[in-house]
Structure formats: structure tokens, C-alpha cells
Image (cartoon, rainbow, N blue to C red):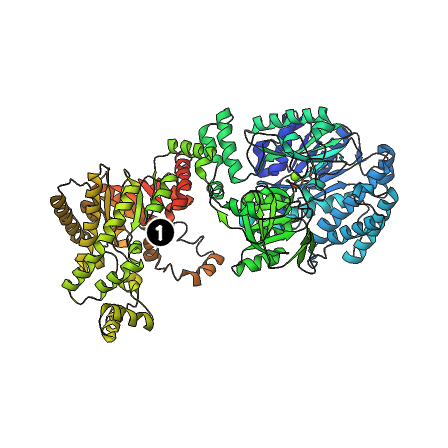
Amino acid sequence: MNDVYFFGEGKADGSASDKNLLGGKGANLAEMINLGIPVPPGFTISTDICRYYMERDAYPDDLENQVQHSLKQVEKIMGQTFGNFDNPLLVSIRSGARKSMPGMMETILNVGLTSKTIPGLITKSKDERFVYDAYRRLITMYADVVMEKAACIKPQEGEGIREKLDKIMESLKNRESVTRDGDLSIENLKELCDIYKSTIKKTLKSEFPDDPNTQLWGGITAVFKSWNGKRAVSYRNIENIPHDWGTAVNIQSMVFGNMGDNCATGVAFTRNPATGKNNFYGEWLPNAQGEDVVAGLRTPNPLNHMSCSNKAKNLPSLEEIMPEIYGKLDTIQKQLETHYRDMQDIEFTIQNGHLWMLQTRVGKRNGAAAIRMAVEMAEEGLIDEKIALMRVNSDDLDEIMHPMLDKKVEKQSKILAAGLPAGPGGGSGQIVFTADDAESWHKDGKQVILVRSETSPEDVHGMFASEAILTARGGMTSHAALVARGWGKCCVVGCADLQISLQEKSLSVNGITLNEGDWLTLNGSNGNVYNGQIPLEAVNLKKNKYFQKIMEIADSHRKLLVRTNADSPGDAQQAREFGAEGIGLCRTEHMFFDPERISAMQEMIIAENETNRRKAIMKLLPYQRGDFYGILKAMAPYPVTIRLLDPPLHEFLPQDDDQISRLANELNVPMEALNARIEKLHEQNPMLGHRGCRLGVSFPEITEMQARAIFEATAQLVQENKIILPEVMVPLVGSVTEFIHQKEIIDNMAEIVKKETGVEIEYLVGTMIELPRACATADKIAEEAQFFSFGTNDLTQTTYGFSRDDIGSFLPDYLNHKIIPIDPFQSIDQEGVGCLVKMGVEKGRGVNPKLKIGICGEHGGDPKSIRFFHETGLDYVSCSPFRVPIARLTAAQSEINP
Ligand code: ADP
Ligand code: MG
Ligand code: MG
């Protein structure tokens, strides 16, 4: 069995295709070696070993041999020996899972430094400062990762060993009156290492190991264990990554960016991850080790002129300071992007003027950037249109449709402070200072902004719960920025004027003090911070040419049509701008709740006989006709499906005594009579009561009035030379006889209106399929109906026997116990409800192969459900206006990648 994969000096055992076994980091290190890119040699212990270790708490017998063997190869290339006193090799121990989980697991640098190897390294490097700097870093990381986390020691918030050690360093810096880590003297660093070791012994009750092999195996095991660390587990839960994948461990010879001024380290993206612009973009720090950039302890320098933010304007770029190396880096980044055909996120270190690549992976990006990159890469010919479509996901679209700050109000607001624009869009909220507070306030329904000096992976649950994130330190590649971008969250980092007091739960900034619970507003697109609340406004997608282009590409690749659910001309117009090709569901009941109309409606409901009912109902006719006129016109020439009155009538009647007596007055009926009528309408189980087509059967005059309103509006529009296609939809049909009953009324009315107006009207009459019985008898219904539209909300209710309005009381238990995988009202239950949909389609099309079939439930905007409807052979999905672009994209993706 081979569990250890070597890479180094132009040859690697693995390649990019081995991600499952070697993790993303290991597989890509191997791939870079194969491409001839300079990478420090090392080896990867496979994810198999992680799983083995998780199960048995032990390693396979021959693992140690395999590790020794690979270590020898590395030593040979480096001309150094691990643990050798005169010429020691140092290594890093790095985690790396199949899918990147940035910062969620652990890395330890400078492993192999001991009291015995230190003198050797000092002699070789002729740089005592550097050696002790590396040593204090090793002690910190090792104590944190191996001696505390992996040992399952759980300190209180703020009391962790890393925080303790960091505080010691801060106070030493204060004592010496220096601000930068690099200004500490050799003697300071030596003293620091000693204090570190004694603090560790006191706090963790064990000694920092002074033996290279103990360090090595302690580190390997701790990295494996970090797979099951709290933050890694919660990240996987949020990102839906399986818990049984395991991580690989990479052991790699160290290269040093902290050996002086011709050394550096940095992180870069082959394109700008915040905007998508095709610019090499990144940050670097002279004389530093890699962790410094990500940890956000110092504001990093820009990589080149294109990476300059306002804050970093005066800091020198790598392009200026080391032009030759910058040129090499630029060549490599281009090579990597061309090779992987996607934007790469890369890490590099420069040691004494020599460039080393330490990582490449597909870079995280926000929604706007994802769309722009997909479109531009397709235009450049780097990828084809199909791949471009698959590169964008529904969350990306969701995100760019998210609101920005109201520009006018923003202009008038005074800027409180400014940081780096790390995650675009606007966000307002009440400030909190810990991740736990963010989570619990959010649970209480509050809108919060998490404010931290810098975030660490321990904060992810709180970041997730926040509207926006604000940090005092860190750059565009800091942890907060990375995570926020991944989620498309508003985020401002490196806001240096911010002074945070965790004890007081307050912050002060430019003379103003804000306490927990005060409102703050961030603009994550320009980095500005405002006191108080600024309203948000929707984005203008018409002006976003990349969005328009990706939608155009999607439309050319999809067959499934996309309609919208809309009850007003305004919604219809909005949906058309998003690309809707008709209305799949126009609910008529909303039209009755208008104050002017409700009284006519109520009069109709309490009428004791047909004559009075007709009189009342005819008062509604002009309103309805006007509504339909507006909607049909807004959607012309696309079809509009209008559903006849659906909810139980008691929903329109007042509930409390005050309102009842007012209504009695208005209608001039005795209070008792009204009460009696209301009493009579009361139902034990309204969801299964007198509603849907049952109303039309009991009160055909309602159907008549609605049909008349539809056809009169149609006739008028036809006379105005519009192409109008109303589709009259009968709700809640369980047996074909109900449908026949209603269809006759509708057809009769069409004839009457045709005669009265002399206008030829085209229309369809169909039904909503939303009861199991309708699915089972769909063949019979299809003989009469001209279209089907699956009402998957009611179909889910009636299939499961779950009331959508009451599911909240038990759904959390069902999800926790994995009794059902997901809320069936959000994403369709393919196995059960979906089975009925399939049956309905097969039976319906069996009788009428051309039967038009759509879906108009909430599921029409859910990507997973849309894929299912595509597979099932539906003609269209209908969803709320803001989901239309998502449905268009998903429809194309289901075609490309079934
Ligand atoms: P993460 O997965 O959290 O990014 P990494 O394993 O990439 O963690 O390591 C953290 C930092 O340490 C990175 O900046 C990386 O470039 C740096 N690093 C890791 N291994 C080495 C090495 N062998 N030599 C120099 N720097 C290293
Ligand atoms: Mg990394
Ligand atoms: Mg329904």
C-alpha cells in the first residue's frame, strides 16, 4: 500500500487529478512540479491515512517507514538533514482537504528547530535574528495546534495559548517601544522564546518538545485531528462537505521569506476576486512568513499598480521593489491560469531573491466576479460557453441582485472611517463584538454587524449570522475577506482607525464611541463605514453587461421556459426585465383585499341568496377587469395564467368584534345575522375545506364574474392590437367532473363576451394539479384540460399531510434527526411528491402528447427542484420575479449537465 506521495525537483508521484487522495493542496503542489514550476520538495500523506487514524487512533505499521523514505528524498534534494545539528532541514506540516476549506484546519511552520539544531542553522544562515524569529513562530503554532487544540484542551474565549503568547509579544514590544515584529532585537526574541516555553509549561502542563521527530509526528497527528476540529466541522456543515472525506497532510521543506529584505511572502489571484477584472491582483509583505499575510497582522503591500487600494497607495509594490522576480511570478500566474483554465489563488515566498510557489487553487470569488470571469474567459476562448455557464451558480446571481446602499443617502452621510472593500454590497446592523453574540442576536431576529480586530476561523459561525463584517486589521486576502467573499457578504477589513474594547463591548473611532447594539452601516464596495442606518436599494441589472451576457448565453442553451408568479402589472414588468416569458400564476384573491373592494367581497360572502350575491359580485367586475387589463398588457405578447378564486371565503371576513360591528353597520345587517354567517363559514380544517374549485361549484357566479372580467379585458386589448393569451386555471381539481363543471361556465362566458364585443378571443382552460387524486386521474383530466400546472405547495401539503403553516413546530426535529433531508416546501421531495408529478405528466401526456405542463409552486425558483422539473419533461417553471434569472441559468445548466 502506498500512502505517501513524493513531490520535488521536476518529478511527482501524484497530479491534479488525485485530489480525493492527496487533497487539493497536495494534488496541486504535485501538478505544479509536473509543470516545471519551482516548488519546495516534500511529500503528501494521503486522506486514506486520515480515515484510518480516525477509526483506529493509530497509523498503519509501515507508515513511519514510508515517511522516513520520502524524507530522505527531500533531504537529498535540499542537501540538508532533518534533525542534523550542523545542517538542519526544516519542514512545514500543512493540511489539505479535497475541497479547499481556507483556514479551517492547521498548518505548522519551521518544524525541526530545537536547542540542538538552532546553532547549526545560525551558522548556515548567518542570521541569528531570523532563526529566533522562526523559532518563536514554531513554538506559537505548535503550542496552539498540537499541545492545545489536538489535545482537546478548551480554554475560555480569549484565554487560548496562542492569544496568551501573542499578548506576551505585544507587551514585550511595548516595553521595547517598537511597533513592528521585525524591530525586536535578537536578545528580545531569545527572551521571548524562553518566556513562551515557560508559559506553555505552566498553562498546558507539558513541555514544548525539543526533539525533531516528536515535533514531526505531533504535528502530523494534530493536522489529521484538525479535520474534526470545531470550526472545520461547522464549516463543512455550512458548505455541505461530507465529514468522511478526511484531510491529507503535506510535509514540505521550508523556504524562508523572513531572512531579510530580499525575502518576502505573498498571496495573489490571477484575476481580481472582488470585481472579476482580468488583472493580476495580490498582496505581499517583505521579510515575513506566509501566515503574516493571511492573519492580517500588518497591512500588506500591493503586488503591483493594479492592486493598489486607497490604503495601500503609499506602500511600495513588488513590481517596483523586485521587478525581475515580479516578472517571473507574472509568467507563472499566467501559466497556471491557462493550465487550469480558471482563476487561481496562489501563495509564494521569496527567499534571498529566489521565487518559490507554495500553493495554487481555484480562487474563491464573489458573485459579480464569478459572472464577469465566466463571460470574459469564454470571450477569450479560455473556456467554452457551456463551462462558462457551469461556472456561475445560483448564489452568485442571488448576490448581485442583493441591495447596495442608497446612493443619495450615502452621499449625504458623513464617513465615519474607511477600510478595504473586501465584500461588496451594503449592510446595516447593530454591532456585536463576538461571534457567539452575533449568532445569538441573529437567532433573536436581529440584524447584526460583527466587529472584530481581525477574524479567525473560530468566528465563522458568527460571521455567517451577520449582515456584514468589519475588522480593524488585515488586508484583502485576510481571513475575514476570504470568508466574506465566499459567501457574498458585505465586508470591510483593515479599518485601522477602529479601536475595539472587548471588555466594554464598545468601539471608538475618530472621536466617536459606539456600544454594543448601536447601528452601523458598511459599504463593502468602497470600504466606507457610516454611523447609523442607511437604507439599501436594489441594483440595476440592466447596466450590468456581464449579467446580461451570461443570461443571453443561458437562454441559448436552455429549452425549459421560465415564467413568473405575479399579481400586479408592476411585478409583471419587473419579471420581464429579469427575463420572464409569461406569467405562470396570477393569484386573483390578492386583488380583493384592497380596502375599496373588500366590502363588496364581504357583501357577496354574507349574501343569503343568489340574487344578492350576484348584485354584490358585479360590483367587483370593473375592478377585476381593470386588474386583468393591466397584467395582460404588461405581459403581452406572452401568455398569462390566471387562477380563479382559491382561498376559503372566511379569510375575507373580519375576526374581532369591533370590525364585525363596523361591517354590520356598513352592510346594514343585524350584528347577530353577521355573526351567524361568520359562524357558519367557520371550518375545522380550512386547508381541506371549502376552497379552490369547490367555491366555483357552490357559487358559479364567482367563476362567471372572473371569466367575464378576463375575457372583457382580453377583448379590449385585442382591439388595441395586442396579442393576448389568457390561460384560465381552475384550482384544486380532484376529479375531472369538477373541472368539466367549471370549464362549461368559462366557455359559455367566452362565447357571451365574443358576441357582445364582436372580438375573436383566444384562450385556454386548464387546471392546477395539486391533489394526489388529480395526479392519479391525470389521464381523465387531460382529456378535458388544455394545460396542467403543478401546484407543488398544496401537492406537498396533501402528499405528506403536512400543513405548511404548522410545519415549523416539528420541522427542526425532523431535520435534526435526519427524518427528512430538507424542508420539502423549499426543495421538492423528489421521491414522493416528485413521483406524483411524474405520474401526472405521464398520464396526462399519454392522452394528450402536446399537453402544456408547468409548475407554479415555490419550488419553481429552487435550483435543485428546477433540475428535477427539467428531467421530468415540463415545459416551464414559474417563480417569483427575483428568482427568474436563477431559473434561466439552472434551466441551461440542467441541459448541459443533466
Ligand atoms: P492554509 O491552507 O490555511 O492556507 P497553508 O498550509 O497554505 O495553510 O500555510 C499557511 C502559510 O504558510 C501560507 O502562507 C503558506 O504559504 C506558508 N507555508 C506553508 N508551507 C511553507 C513552506 N514550506 N515554506 C514557506 N512557507 C510555507
Ligand atoms: Mg494556503
Ligand atoms: Mg393551491
The residue positioned farthest toward the front in the image shown: 412
Residue 614 or 886: which is nearer the viewer? 614
Position of residue 64 in the picture relative to residue 801 (left or right): right
Which is nearer the eye, 438 or 723? 723
Residue 136 found in image quarter: top right
Question: Is the residue indicated by label 1 positioned so its CB lies within 8 Å of ligand 3?
Answer: no
Say if 655 sits above or below 525 in the image: below
**Amino acid under disc 1:** Gly
Q: Which of the 4 image quarters holds residue 524?
A: top right
Residue at coordinates 29% horizontally, 45% vertically from top-left? Answer: 631
The reply to whether residue 840 is visible in this rendering is: no
The residue at 64%/29% (across/down) is 32
Picture coordinates of residue 494 (x, y %)?
Answer: 66, 44
Name the side, left or right, on which 783 lies relative to 568: left
The quadrant the N terminus occupies is: top right
Q: Which image quarter holds the C terminus?
A: top left
Label 1, on which residue? 832
Asked if 802 appears above or below 829 in the picture, the reply is: below
Q: Quadrant of ligand 3?
A: bottom left
Indicate the position of residue 703 as horizontal and vertical percent values: 20, 54
Q: Is residue 653 visible?
A: yes
Looking at the image, which is closer to me, 534 or 105?
Answer: 534
Return the residue found at the far bottom: 672
Location of residue 96 in the rendering, given as x and y in whole percent from the top left corner: 63, 41
Q: Point out residue 283 in the picture as x, y percentages from the top left corner.
A: 67, 35
Residue lying at the far left of the rendered structure: 755
> Left or right of 830: which side holds 443?
right
Q: Nearer the viewer, residue 474 or 200?
A: 474
